[in-house]
Every structure is written in C-alpha cells, then in structure tokens.
Image: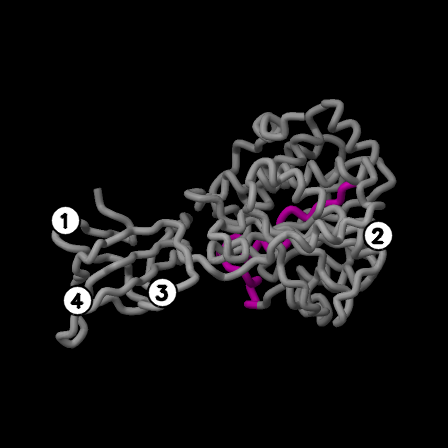
Amino acid sequence: MNLEQLFLDNKEKTIEGRYLTLESVEPILKRLNTDNQLSVVGQSVQGRTIYKYVIGSGKTKIYLWSQMHGNESTTTKALFDFLNLLHSGTELAERFLSNFTFCCLPMLNPDGAFLYTRANANEIDLNRDSQALTQPESKILRAVFEEFKPDYCYNLHDQRTIFGVADTGKPATVSFLAPSYNEEREINASRQKAINLIAEMNLVLQEFIPGQIGRFDDSFNINCIGDTFQYLGVPTILFEAGHFPGDYQREMTRKYIFIALVSSFIGICENVVVVNRTKEYLNIPQNKVVFYDLMYKKVKINYDGNEKITNFAAQYKEELVDGKINFNAYIAKIDDLENFFGHEVFDAQGASYEDEDGNFPKIDQKANFCLGKEQKFVNGLIKK
C-alpha cells in the first residue's frame, strides 16, 4: 500500500497552515455529514459549538479528540484527511468502517483555536483539568468518553520545535506516549495495547522519517487526560506532531500523522496488539529539548570594549496578527550552546555583530542585526 499516495488522495485541501478555527472546519463537518454522523455535544466558555462526529459500525470503538490546545492544529488537519478516507468508498475505507466505530471531537477547544492559545478562554490548560473538570470543554470530553465507552483513546496534539530525538541532532517530527496509569509506571494489559500500537506506528514511520520519531517521558500525572483514561483502563495513545525541516506550517508533519493513524488501525485489524512489543517501544529514543529555530556560530561581539567570539540562538514566537500567524524571531540564548542544535545554522566565521542598539545581542530582542558588512538579518534570516 502506498501510504503517501493515500494521503494525497484524501488530503482536505480547504485547510492548511497553523491557524485553524471553528469557522475553518464547520463547512467540512457539514459536508461530511452524509448520514447524520454529526451532532452538537456542547459549547465552549465563549459559546462556540463543540461537535461530535461518529462514523462506522464496527465493534471496536475508537475515541479521538484534537485541538484540546487551541494552537495545536496539525493533528486536526490529519484527522480530517482521515475522515475523507473513510468517505472514499475504497476497500480500505469499507474495512475500517466495518471493523471500527470512530467517535471524534475534531476541535475540543474552539475558543483557544480562535485566540491561538494553548489554554481555553478561562486560561485553563484542559490537559490539566481531567480530575477537577472545572471547564465545560473538559466536562464534554469526559461525558462523551463515559457514554461512548471506547476501546482505544487517541489524544492528538502538537509539540514545539524545541524537541529533538535524544541527542541525535534530528527533530522529533512525530512523538508518541503510552501514558502511565500509576506512579510506578507499570505496564498492565491496557497500557500494553497502547505500547504495541505505538511500536507498530513507529515501525511504519521509520520508512518515511527515519530517526525522527521520539517518545515522551511517561511520568504519571493523574490531572492529564491521557493518564486519567489509561488509569480508567482504556488503552490511550498520545500523538505529538512536531517539526519537519523547513515545515513551519506543518504540512509535511500532517502527512505523517495521517500515515500513523492509518497504520495503527491496520495494526488493530491485524491484531498486532496481542504481541508484547515493549522492547520496541522503549527503543524509541526519548524526546529532549535540544533545538533552537535559528543558531549563529563564531560571531564576534564587543561587550564593554572587550571583543570575543561567541554563539547565540533565536527562537520563533508564533504571534496572531489580523487572522494570520506570524513567526517572529527573538534572541533566546547567548554563548553556551553546547549540546544544542539549530533548525537553521549560520556560520559567521568571525564577522562582527551589530544592531541598532550596539555590538552584542540581548535576550528577547527582535532578531534584526548585521554580521559584518555583507550580511543583514531580518527576523532571524539573511535578507536577500
């Protein structure tokens, strides 16, 4: 099976980029509502609709939710690509629809999506509200869980560009976690199924992005929704869509999340969950904070009359302006960059640093500067 072609055949072309709001996805949901699959399950803090989409007639029940964090839209795009596949009329679609019942909350936090914030409109992180259930969105997620009684939970997220695969120098383009169900991080039958599915998805993804799959730390936190559902005995998988080189709009990563979803459901059909694949899972390197977006090496600076050669790094902040996400680069680290990597690296070869304020970079200032007389950098990149 050509999984890349499968993605291209089913990609939802009406959505792209990072800023994905309820207004973006409502027309798609209504178009896919061919047989009353769509329903309203509640409203957000600010009164936006939270939709549930249920499709399939199979006995194995899959619960998927995305954009629990409003600024994490990559998995939402991939989820709609997958829903298109289920409507494709192909043999694979029929196989999935007869084996599974899928229950999706495509955008759990529509207020955060509109504001492009991690938290909801009350500034609460919904992924730390699984016990207190103080927010309407958290209550909806839990109520649908209890009504649907899933066999598997898919917790769909994005992760920042700072994450790499251990110390390999490769970005963590996709990361997974089978959350713990207790403080001891033990493996019971439920968690084992999640582990086995992750091992299968990793096996498939390594063919496309070798060395770019990471594993999250499994410290137990009952306030996190994945840990809660795992604790309640339902195999739960955390998906994290990360950085692919040059892909700040996460359109390449979107493809790999789609491939992971498809391969996991094929795996369940083929019963890969009955084999103990813990060793494979643990061999996936852990995520590590090792990346900056932009790194500048061998830069000459003049600080209080003292010249020296140093390094510095800049990080993008994703800022919503007039309905668009701007990636604005700010100086984030100076000097000690040992054991860190840059998604873009510039070798100044001893050229002198200069900006409007002086001869050395300062933390949190915009990355607009010159290196020597020839290279002018605007928003962290060389002005051409």
On screen, 376 above or below 365? above
Question: Cα distance, mark 1 to mark 4?
Answer: 16 Å
- Per the rendering, the mark at residue 119 is none
Residue 270 position within the rendered picture, expressed as x and y whole percent measured from the top left: 81, 35
Instruction: Tell me the number on the disc at residue 332.
Output: 3
First in residue order: circle 3 vs circle 4: 3
Which residue matches tag 4?
359
Residue sitting farthest toward the right: 59
Q: Do residues under tags 2 and 3 come within 8 Å of each other at their CB atoms?
A: no
Label 1 Cα crowd, 10 Å radius (few <14 / some 14-19 / many 20+): few
Kindly report the distance in space between the C-alpha atoms of the residues bearing marks 1 and 3: 24 Å
Say which residue label 1 marks: 374
Q: Which residues are magenta?
A: 101-123
Q: The residue tagged with tag 4: helix, strand or loop?
A: loop
**Alpha-carbon span between mark 1 and mark 2:** 63 Å
The residue at the point 53 percent across, 51 percent down is 172
27 and 336: which one is in front? 336
Which numbered mark, 1 or 3, is in the foreground of this view?
1
